[in-house]
Image (cartoon, rainbow, N blue to C red):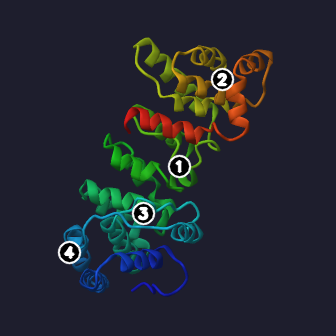
Amino acid sequence: MTDYNSNNTPAALLKEWLDRALSETTAGWLQSGLEKADDPVSDQGFYVAFGMVPRKLGKATLELNDEDLQKADASRKGWRPQGLSVDQAARLLLTLNRSVIMGDRFPDWLDQLIATGDVAEQVALYRGLPLFPYDKKLSLRAQEGLRTNIKTVFEAIAHDSPFPAEYFEENAWNHMVLKALFIGSALYPIQGIDQRTNVQLTRMLTQYAHERWAAKRVISPELWRCVGRCPNDSALDDLKRVISSSDELENRAAVLALNDFPEKNELVEGLLQTQTELLAAIKNGELTWDRLGVQVAEGSGQ
């Protein structure tokens, strides 16, 4: 069994947080489940405990403080466990514990576990992607998971996780970003969203914007976050249209995107100078892409 007393590993932290959140009775059940799941010969104990977790431990959100979150990031850079529920944490702990037993068989075993799991189980396991061993071998499983139109499953992979930015090739990354917009999922919780902008993604997003405009459909202002840092030939004309929109969030997005242009010609500078108040807000940190993303999500009820 995993040594939960050694270092601030993700497994040790999960165990610490669960022990803090559970009663003596429920903590005892979890400990028993971990021991039964530790059988090196059979997976039966694991499957029983894994399936019983919500009924035995409940689904309350883990209460994590700033120190907990700092420890999480120190144990695995980019790990953001905020919002993790008790049942999700316990399922991750059981799976991490089982990974020690499985060794190099773990990726195939996990793939099957996710493929046959219900939505709640998939969400828990996908949130654990950056914590699991053999993580490079799990990229195809993550990409398969992103095919879903179930937002909670999609966001368990795409949001608040370092995994996609670290392991997705450009094509997979680009389709994840486009899919997020397609299903109405926010972009700002995607780690690496700014660093992984690329020419092909800009082409895909501007084409998507033109299709939405032609169909008289709404476009998330967050789309332009991925365009300004890597603009193509149509980006400036598109942003001229967005900056003149009657929608305040679109105005802000256009100014942020134009301000991100790596090279600013006279036309770009001229457009920016018509928005001096928003430029000042960018300069003093009041207007950022993340803040805009939160406002977009709040406005759309995400």
Residue 280's place in the image compared with 206, above or below, is below
3D distance between C-alphas at marks 3 and 2: 36 Å
Mark 3, residue position: 128
Q: Earlier in the sequence, mark 4 or mark 2?
A: 4
Mark 1, residue position: 168
Q: Earlier in the sequence, mark 1 or mark 2?
A: 1
Mark 2, residue position: 232
In the picture as drawn, the residue positioned furthest to the front comes out as 277
Residue at 74% over, 19% down: 268
3D distance between C-alphas at marks 4 and 1: 33 Å
The location of residue 23, given as percent across then percent down, is: 28, 81
Circle 2: is it few (<14), some (14-19), or many (20+) Cα within 10 Å? some
3D distance between C-alphas at marks 1 and 2: 23 Å
Q: Amino acid at mark 1?
A: Phe
Which quadrant of the view contains residue 236? top right
Residue 277's place in the image compared with 76, above or below, is above
Q: Earlier in the sequence, mark 1 or mark 3?
A: 3
Q: Earlier in the sequence, mark 4 or mark 1?
A: 4
Circle 1: is it few (<14), some (14-19), or many (20+) Cα within 10 Å? some
Mark 4, residue position: 48
Q: Amino acid at mark 2?
A: Asn
Q: Amino acid at mark 3?
A: Gly
Asked whether residue 179 is in view, the answer is no
The location of residue 85, given as percent across then percent down, is: 34, 63
Q: Earlier in the sequence, mark 3 or mark 2?
A: 3
